Image: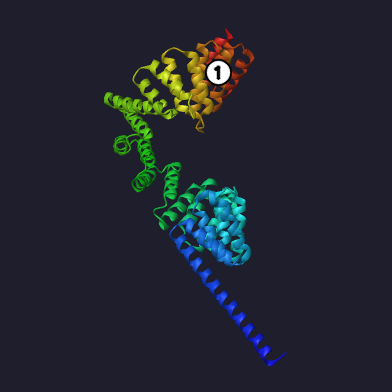
Amino acid sequence: MTRRSILTVVLLAVGFAAVLAATAIQRERTYQGLLARGTNALRHHDAAVAIEALSGAIALKRSSMVAYLRRGEAYLLGGPQGFPSALRDFREAARLDRGAVRPLERLGDISTKLGSHERAAEYYRTGLELDAGAPAMTYKLALATYQAGRLADALELAQRASRLDPRLAEAHYLRGLCLVDQKRLREGSEAFRRALAGDASLVEARAQLALTARQLGRGGEEVTQLEQLAEQTQQPEYAVELGRALTRLGRIDQAIEVLDKASTRFPRDTKVMTTLGSAWLEKAAATEDGRARTQALAWLERAEADERRTGRETSDTLAALGRAWLLGDNPRQAVEVLQRAVATPPASVTAFDDLGRAAEQLSDWSLARTALERAQALDPTTRPDGRAARAAHLADLSTRLSDHEAAAAWLDEARHLRPNDMSLVARAVEAHWAAGHRDEAVRMLYAALAKEPEDAALRRLASRMQE
């Protein structure tokens, strides 16, 4: 090969290398420009522009973890319909850089939104293997674990997150939820306070603190927290809860004032109307104030009419209206409304009790007994006195219906709830005797006399049974 040929080849090679270098430089500049454009669009929440630019960047550099990560973020701006594409991009980003935490975190976030809490926990756990001291990721793992139903593990993780960053309000809030679920109400209450110390605007923590205060019998603290919630959120549900809390404390005039203001601010909210009507009803029951009863009926009828018109009748409104009619000595109207109340789920124990009382005033013993039987079945209270009194009343109604078997059974329930009440034992003996259970009646009577030999009622009953 001649010297001229060699020189030509060398020049061609140099030129080709220069072209390749220039092309690579231009390609990198174009990639960087598209990446910057996509990032800027992402910052301004312009999903379409961001996706277009970042897709161009990926076409130029398939190995760019950052481009996949940011395009995944752009897909998330489109809401749930963007989740599949976002998941694909975050998985690719995690594959391209196995030391990157952010793609794993975002995969966990989407899995949480999709309700796949165990999968979310796996992603967060993998991320923490790369960055064990990340409090936010630790909190997210704790939350996913809690949502997966693993309470003890969630509590441990929430405590770890709050130790890593004592200012992380969400971690203290989650710790409080775990403690409350474990029935550790006082510790839970303190955790909610810590959450609010870190972020006073955390509505969920304040709402839980109010609820926990109520469960602990701290009515004053409950009211304080609900007052702040009502002011902070300007939402009717917190005005309603505040009105109910004040009513429970007997501060009825204050409850009426709060709810009256709420009714002006939210004139179409039927829960506000019902709660205001119920507060007036409590005042009427306590004071026998005719004006209070009139106000109660007015608000409750308005709430009932609005609910009926929209096809959204609630048992609470109907039950309160029925009680208002009962308090106003109109048992027939009360029965009509209360029957609708108990037929509208979820019906309350109080509605069945009121229906029983109204039916008794109409001498409808069968309806009264049926209503009180439902109340007894639904009553969740652990206090025996109320259930014992209702059982004894059911025995009276059964006797009126000549159902002595049922009367005996109800009195047995009553005396088991109040074993030291000899008057119930005496009534149970009589009921069993009337039902033809002579041996059981005698056995029960002499067992009671062995316990209380000087009880006059039992001695008279023994004498009468020997005649």
Q: Report the quarter where the N terminus lies.
A: bottom right
Where residue 180 sits in the image (x, y, percent)? 51, 47
| Dot 1: element | helix
Residue 196 visible, this angle: yes
In the rendered image of this protein, does residue 296 appear above or below residue 408?
below
The quarter of the rendered structure image containing the C terminus is: top right
Left or right placement of residue 3 versus residue 252 in this view: right
Q: Nearer the viewer, residue 333 or 221?
A: 333
Mark 1 closeness class: few <14, some 14–19, many ≥20 residues within 10 Å: many
Residue 124 appears in the rendering: no
Residue found farthest to the bottom: 3
Identify the residue shown where x is 28% and y is 25%: 289
Q: x%, y% of residue 323?
A: 39, 24
Comparing 84 with 332, the one in front is 84
The residue drawn where x is 58% and y is 9% is 466
**Residue displayed at 51% across by 18% down:** 370
The answer to which image quadrant residue 419 occupies is: top right
Q: 262 or 387, which lies in front?
A: 262
Three-letter amino acid code of the residue under disc 1: Ala
**Residue beneath disc 1:** 428
In terms of depth relative to the viewer, which is nearer, 111 or 394? 111
Q: Quadrant of residue 413?
A: top right
Relative image position of residue 417 (x, y in whole percent): 54, 27
